[in-house]
Amino acid sequence: MSDVREETGTAPRENGVLHYVGLGLSGALLLLVLALAVVVIVVPRASGSIPLTVLTGSMAPGLPPGTLIVVQPVDVDDLAVGDVITYQIRSGDPAVITHRIIAINASTTGARTFETKGDNNSDADPDPVGAIQVQGKVWYSVPLVGFANNAVNGENRAWIVPGIAVLLIAYAGYMIASGAASAVRKKREVQPRP
């Protein structure tokens, strides 16, 4: 059985270079989004870690503003000088700081406190950090992704999530309509002309 297009005298349409470039870029973008989702959402949730965004330049150049950091809970006895920790400014206060441990002090009772300093700061932090204030140790960081993390959290989530849903529905509608138009066009090409 031969191809109907050959019988009617029309050659099959070949895809151009731009078509393949577009497919490659779409695939790469999809893989990038999936990889970021794993790094930013799946791994932190699976490990009990907390994704946070660096907002100030105190840890630059290693952790500049906009960097997403993933803070993993850790036993304070395992912390060492040089570790980057996230701690509450005041015990029980949700506001946190991420700085490097520059010294560890122990009282006669065995309680540990940590002296911290931002890598980009000239002076150490004024108050020692108690063990109860420590939220965890920075496990890994992803540059610039913190801005996106901030954008989709909090008040912005109320309009971003529905906005993305609308865009996805519109894209699906476009794909269905273009597929239907392509099928109609192919059907017209197959029909013999009088």
Image: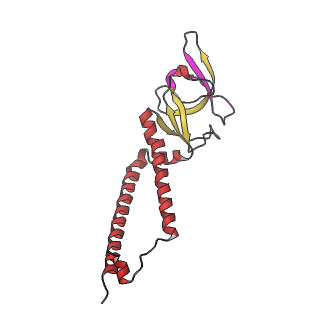
Q: 71 or 17: which is nearer to us?
A: 17
Residue 182 falls left or right of residue 105: left
Residue 144 falls left or right of residue 8: right
Residue 128 versus residue 70 in the image, above or below: above
Q: Is residue 88 visible?
A: no
Q: 43 or 135: which is nearer to us?
A: 43
Find residue 38 and report its horizontal and vertical position in percent.
45, 43
Residue located at (62% from left, 37% from top): 59
Q: 96 or 183: which is nearer to us?
A: 183
Q: Residue furthest front?
A: 1
Q: Is residue 45 visible?
A: yes
Residue located at (36% from left, 54% from top): 162
Residue 170 versus residue 106 in the image, above or below: below
Find residue 189 and report its horizontal and vertical position in percent.
34, 80
Residue located at (53% from left, 33% from top): 139
User: Is 153 in the magenta?
Assistant: no
Residue 141 versus residue 102 in the image, above or below: below
Q: Which range of residues does the magenta coloring cover?
A: 109-133
Residue located at (47% from left, 59% from top): 26
